[in-house]
Amino acid sequence: MTGLPDHEVRALAAVWHISGSGLQGRVLDKYDSALAVRGQPAFVRGEDPYQSAKLLIELRNYLVHYKVHSTSLDEEHELSAKLKNRFDSNTRREDPNHPWFPDQALGAGCARWAWESATALTSQFEAVMGVALAYSTQPEDFWPDGSGGLL
């Protein structure tokens, strides 16, 4: 981040150190801590971009920390209801013998939604904080094709 005064950087470091959230804390709580140090209100929990970012983290955690369990075709995965209307399904995986999640959920539509959700949260954070984040000031450094992620 660029643009935060040194005293706010130190205050944020102290908050994260005292609360123990520096390395282990929840990502969205860290955003709210930074907003509080800056004297800004926290993200509105029931609205986007917070809701989509929270769901994205839930999806990420499910995939990264997967626990084996058995399911039946009659059972809809809890993430299905939350994700179904947020992006286009993976039509290459359409099969009535397989559940929508994860088979039809994971694909290009999900990837685009994930990128858009993360970008919406960080862009709002950047605007409210009055700072310039590295990915928005030097996008070519973060995307191999130099596009800045613009599709």
Image (cartoon, helix red, strand yellow):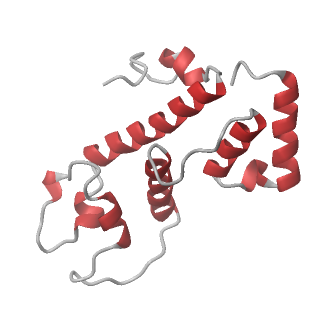
Q: Is residue 107 above or below residue 36?
A: below
Q: Residue at x 14, y 74 (%)?
A: 97
Q: Nearer the viewer, residue 15 or 23?
A: 15
Quick one: 138 or 21, which is closer to the camera? Answer: 21
Q: State the image coordinates of residue 149 (x, y, percent, origin top left).
A: 40, 25
Residue 82 left/right relative to 50: left
Q: Residue at x 31, y 48 (%)?
A: 110
Relative side of 105 to 91, left or right: right
Quarter of the figure that contains the C terminus: top left
Q: Is 78 drawn above or below residue 75 in the view shown?
A: above
Counting from the top left corner in percent of width and height, residue 108 is at 27, 43
> How many numbered marks does the figure carry?
0
Q: Quadrant of the N terminus?
A: top right
State the residue at coordinates (26%, 84%). 72
User: Who is closer to the viewer here, 29 or 80?
Assistant: 29
Q: 8 or 77: which is nearer to us?
A: 8
The picture places residue 142, in percent across and down from the top left corner, at 51, 24
Q: Does 44 sit left or right of 69 as displayed?
A: right
- Residue sitting at x 21%, y 81%: 73
Give the x, y percent position of residue 65: 53, 65
Is 140 located above or below residue 92 in the figure? above
